[in-house]
Amino acid sequence: MSIMNSNFVGSSSSSISTTNQELVENGVAYLCFDFYNKQDCIVQINKSENIFLFAGQGFKFSSNLDYIFSFKIVTDNVVFNFIAKK
């Protein structure tokens, strides 16, 4: 039996952010992207201006027409996890 690549990536456990931490690898784009934040934080999505998220608010994205090519956590020391699909 062969196992095919599922194209899903994400956190293997909770992580703590560093300042301006980019979650999307260079040259990669995601059709689906879910992010959970345990503390208030600021993010930038696809090179956007700063976006504030309340603790636990998170961010969910799913599209057949658009992609997430950049997701940056601007705030440091935020406990987070994410899951995404190419």
Image (cartoon, rainbow, N blue to C red):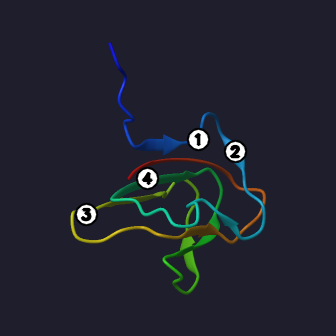
* Sequence-first disc among 2 and 3: 2
The three-letter amino acid code for the residue at tag 4 is Asp
- Element type at marker 2? strand
Q: How many labels does the image show?
A: 4
Distance CA(mark 2)–CA(mark 4): 14 Å
Q: Which badge, 1 or 3, is on the more N-terminal residue?
A: 1
**Which residue corresponds to mark 1?**
11
Residue 75 coordinates in the image, percent (x, y) = 72, 68
**In the rendered image, which quarter contains the N terminus?**
top left
Compared to 18, does 16 lie above or below?
above
Give the residue number, with chain letter if any, for mark 3: 63
Residue that carries the numbered disc 2 in the rendered image: 15
Which element is circle 1 on? loop
Tell me residue 56's x, y (percent).
53, 53
Task: Determine the CA span between mark 2 and mark 3.
Answer: 26 Å
Q: Say what amino acid the circle numbered 2 marks.
A: Ser
SS of the residue at dot 3? loop
Q: Residue at x 78, y 61 (%)?
A: 18
Q: In this view, does 76 lie to the left or right of 2?
A: right
Q: How crowded is mark 1: few (under 14 residues within 10 Å), some or many (20 or more)?
A: few
- Circle 1: residue type: Ser
Secondary structure type for disc 4: strand
> In whole angstroms, how far apart are the C-alphas of marks 1 and 4?
11 Å
Image disc number at residue 36? none
Residue that carries the numbered disc 4 in the rendered image: 34
Q: How crowded is mark 4: few (under 14 residues within 10 Å), some or many (20 or more)?
A: some
Q: Do the residues labelled 1 and 2 touch (CB within 8 Å)?
A: yes
